[in-house]
Image (cartoon, helix red, strand yellow):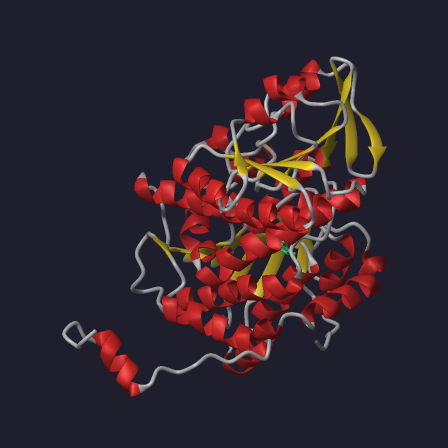
Amino acid sequence: MNTTTSARPAHDIHDISLADQGRLRTEWAGQRMPVLERIRERFEQERPLEGKRVAACLHVTTETANLMVTLKAAGAEVLLCASNPLSTQDDVAAHLVRDHGIGVFAVRGETDDVYYEHIRDALAFRPDISMDDGADLVGSLHMIALERWDDLAGPVRDWVMELDADERQTLVDGVVGSTEETTTGVIRLKAMEKDDVLRFPVIAVNDSLTKHLFDNRYGTGQSTLDGIIRATNVLIAGSTVVVAGYGWCGRGFAMRARGMGANVIVTEVDPLKALEAVMDGYRVMTMEEAAPIGDIFCTLTGNLHVLREEHFRAMKDGAIVCNSGHFNVEIDLESLLRISEGNPTEVRNSVEEYRIDGSGVYLIGQGRLVNLAAAEGHPAAVMDMSFANQCLGAEFLVQNISSLERRVYTVPDAIDREIARLKLESMGSNVDILTEEQERYLASWDQGT
Ligand code: ADE
């Protein structure tokens, strides 16, 4: 990708001098994102987002950098803030600011307050379109619209309170639509739609087949193990890995852990998913039963307090716990701290030891997404499809804005399939084409057996 030096926009990043490294790493990722590259080339010609202000709240990674550059090529004015305080790659942030003139508000390890200052900065950009990974921007906009001041994070509330009623109204009404990257965000948005409070159409990127079947399964599968291994360097072969949640992320992680020789246990609340796990050959049991057996525990449920006090107390000395779900609520961190003797000790980068009843329990990445806190997130080749969906979802939103309702939409099936086709083509694989006879046969109900 050619980099262009642009005027420096407002930003808040760690260190601009990291930009060279960020550029090299972003280019490396870009070489593995051929679908996004094809879209970028078309966008440069057609400029489908001309004049639109896009505020993105995403993990600040090399893959996201390639997305931002693509949105800019489409004619959008873009701003990026972090969707997690621990996932930001500071060199990437520096590269986007210095070489692409993109305003980035993200510092790895930022406090919760700074995290929300950055959300505030994204809102103050007054976007036409917001792009979320976990619904933080959309959530804040709706809290403002509903005047639920107490539900706003401090920095956002302080800023909003200084706006007059008209300014608040234009802020909320200015957003014509949004896209959402992840399962957790989509669940929230669907709840908003059900409660009839959604104020604009949202494209649920996560619901595309070319997103969740690949990113959630193969991306999470690989990057979660990558995070665990980078943080701990433990041997997976022969260990007992407890996977909480058998959605697409859990399925991917279980599959890859087994592939490396782990004995995998799955815990579930949904009998269908649990049955699937049994038939996939895993042991399925309750967390209470798994707690004393597991060597490594990973939560991928989207729910809260999946690992709790009674589980920590039952764990073996040396047990490793981590989370690969969107929010850091799946492990009950308050209980973990409360029942541990003294404060945790950092025993390796990203690994803290909690002493409980004489045993050590080791938490990776403060219970935040282990694949981004302790590794680099999903590989570029899989983010290629996720971010192709983001781009085409945003284009679809703009093209259809007058007919879309205040609902959660999926990316149209034809676009989803086109992304799959382009990805396959880039990988050198072709698919067969139905013969006319086959088409007729599939369309009929009265042709012979
Ligand atoms: N979510 C998971 N992996 C990611 C990555 N590499 N970039 C952006 N978002 C991600």
**In the rendering, at what x and y percent does residue 385 appear?**
54, 65
- Residue 135 placement (x, y as % from top left): 50, 45
The residue that appears at 73% across and 70% down in the rendered structure is 27
Seen in the picture, residue 57 relative to 421 is either above or below; the reply is above
- Where the C terminus falls, by quadrant? bottom left
Q: Is residue 262 above or below residue 61?
A: above
Indicate the quadrant where residue 368 lies.
top right
In this rendering, the answer to whether 196 lies above or below 20 is above
Going by the image, does 400 lie left or right of 248?
A: left
For image coordinates 75% across by 51% down, the residue present is 13
Examine the rendering and report whether any part of residue 295 can be seen.
yes
Q: Residue furthest bottom?
A: 436
Query: Foreground residue, 4 or 443?
Result: 443
Q: Residue at x 34, y 45 (%)?
A: 193
Where, by quadrant of the figure, is residue 72 drawn?
bottom right
Quadrant for the N terminus in the image: bottom right
Q: Quadrant of residue 104?
A: bottom right
